[in-house]
Amino acid sequence: MVQYIVNHLETDTVLFQSDEDELYKFQVQEWDPVIQWFCDKFAVNIQKSRVMEGPKISKETKQILSRHLLSYTQEMYLVN
């Protein structure tokens, strides 16, 4: 599951921002603080993209995220 999440980080729609002005302003207002929080919390640098290719996520960033996700036990993922 961790590998699946990490491998799809580059296609996360939060990291893609529109080239249409109104939507872009909304995305900057709503999503940029979340992206910045993530970068600060994990000491990584994730860039957004305005093109369909999406951002490139460094191997180091993927390793940091993988380590964090793997630190949780399987029982934590179970819903009661």
Image (cartoon, rainbow, N blue to C red):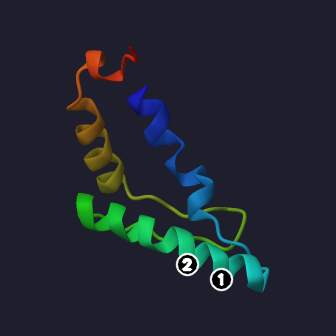
Rounded to the nearest angstrom, the CA distance separating label 2 from label 1 is: 6 Å
Residue annotated with mark 1: 25
- Label 2 close to label 1 by CB (< 8 Å): yes
Q: Residue at x 47, y 71 (%)?
A: 47
Q: Quadrant of residue 2?
A: top left
Label 1, secondary structure: give it. Answer: helix
* Left or right relative to 12: residue 6: left
Provide the secondary structure element on which disc 2 rests. helix
Q: Residue furthest front?
A: 80
Position in image of residue 62 (x %, y %):
36, 48
In the image, residue 47 sits, relative to residue 1, either above or below, namely below
Residue 12 disc label? none
Point 43% across, 25% down: residue:
1
Q: Nearer the viewer, residue 25 or 67?
A: 25
| Residue 69 location, quadrant | top left
Q: Is residue 61 above or below residue 75?
A: below
Q: Quadrant of residue 40?
A: bottom left
What residue is disc 2 on?
29
Q: Which residue is found at the position 76% from the left and 83% from the top?
A: 22
Q: Give the residue at x 29% y 54%.
A: 60
* Amino acid marked by disc 2: Gln
How would you rate the neighbour count of disc 2 (Cα within 10 Å): few for under 14, some for 14-19, many for 20 or more? few
Q: Can you give x and y, in whole percent of width and height, for residue 61 in the image?
A: 33, 55
Q: Residues within 10 Å of mark 1 (few under 14, many from 20)?
A: some
Under mark 1, the amino acid is Lys
